[in-house]
Amino acid sequence: MTTITLPEDFTEIRLLFEQANDGDVIIQLADGRQFILSAIDDLDIEIARSRQNQKLMEFLEKRAKQTKTIPLDEFKRRLDLI
């Protein structure tokens, strides 16, 4: 992910950003390529960074493939909660 800081005098682009505050904006170039402009918050940034964490993604993928589960009552017994 790359962050670009724009100077204050980008009026036309600023209007796109104002539209993106209300909802995602699809920008289409003359050659047909499309891009999406979307307002983000700190959570969106954290999610994007987490997705780039290869070790975390491998762990989550491995965990998602696990099929063996422990019933809740058994789990409570193991923790001496019942």
Image (tube, rainbow, N blue to C red):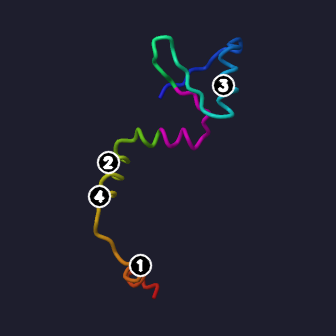
Q: Check disc 3 and report its element: helix, strand or loop.
A: helix
Mark 4 crowd level (few <14, some 14–19, many ≥20, 10 Å Cα): few
Task: Determine whether label 2 and label 4 are within 8 Å by CB.
Answer: no
Cα separation between marks 4 and 1: 20 Å
First in sequence: mark 3 vs mark 4: 3
Q: Is residue 71 left or right of residue 11?
A: left
Cα separation between marks 3 and 1: 48 Å
Task: Determine whether label 2 and label 1 are within 8 Å by CB.
Answer: no
Instruction: Give the residue type at disc 3.
Output: Phe
Mark 1 crowd level (few <14, some 14–19, many ≥20, 10 Å Cα): few
Q: Check disc 1 and report its element: helix, strand or loop.
A: helix
First in sequence: mark 4 vs mark 1: 4
Residue 28: in magenta span: no
Q: In which image quadrant can residue 68 be found?
A: bottom left
Residue hosting label 4: 65
Instruction: Give the residue type at disc 1.
Output: Leu
Instruction: Give the residue type at disc 2.
Output: Glu
* Residue 50 or residue 26, whichever sits in front: 26
Residue hosting label 2: 58
Q: Is residue 36 left or right of residue 52?
A: right
Q: Give the range drawn in magenta.
A: 36-48
Residue hosting label 1: 72
